[in-house]
Image (spheres, rainbow, N blue to C red):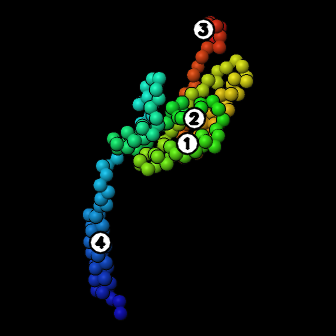
Amino acid sequence: MLNRRSFFTSTACLGATLALGADKQESIAPSTGRPKRIKLGIATYSYWHFKTEKVPIETVIEKAAEIGVEGLDILHRQMDIPEKEPLTAAHRSYLQKLKRHAFHNGIAPVSISIHQNFVQQDPAERQRQVEHTHKCIEIAYGNGVSQLDCSTVLRRCAQDWSEA
């Protein structure tokens, strides 16, 4: 029969058990043997510097993993696929290879940096820029990236600033 004394005894024991068990749980930390990662990302163009020879994105992924960085901003122009051509099966295969390489190195592609120039007098050229943006959205989607860093290049359409 449950009376006041047995109720308090039972709850005290339960409280002590939970407290001791919680303390024991907190003291156990999983040992992975890997250094603690810094929640930062690196842009692939930081290694390329726009010199004549491109630094492969795979190399940047490996260097980012070595220094403990978790994220990668990939410059579209640095990829080993033609910038303006439509995506082919071979291009998609390359994108999957990059995604897999990043995964195996503990790196998350977090952004794709792209360049467009929507300030065009020619409607056909503007449309090409829009199509290129659609291609880059498909690239981002295929790599699990939810952010595009779209750098629009503003070039003057007028001959001088007084006409703009």
Whether residue 19 is visible, yes or no, is: no
Residues under numbered marks 1 and 3 in contact, where contact means CB atoms less than 8 Å apart: no
Q: Amino acid at mark 1?
A: Tyr
From this viewpoint, which residue is outermost toward the right?
A: 123
**Residue assigned mark 4:** 21
Badge 3 local density, few (<14 within 10 Å), some, or many (20+)?
few
Q: Residue at x 38, y 43 (%)?
A: 65
Viewport quadrant of the C terminus: top right
Please say if 12 is above or below 34: below
Q: Amino acid at mark 2?
A: Ile
As helix, strand or loop, the secondary structure at mark 3 comes to loop
Q: Residue at x 35, y 93 (%)?
A: 1
Q: Amino acid at mark 4?
A: Gly
Comparing 160 with 2, the one in front is 160
As helix, strand or loop, the secondary structure at mark 4 comes to helix
Give me the C-alpha separation between circle 1 and circle 3. 44 Å
Q: Residue at x 46, y 45 (%)?
A: 102
Residue 161: numbered disc: 3
Q: Position of residue 93 (x, y in %)?
A: 58, 45
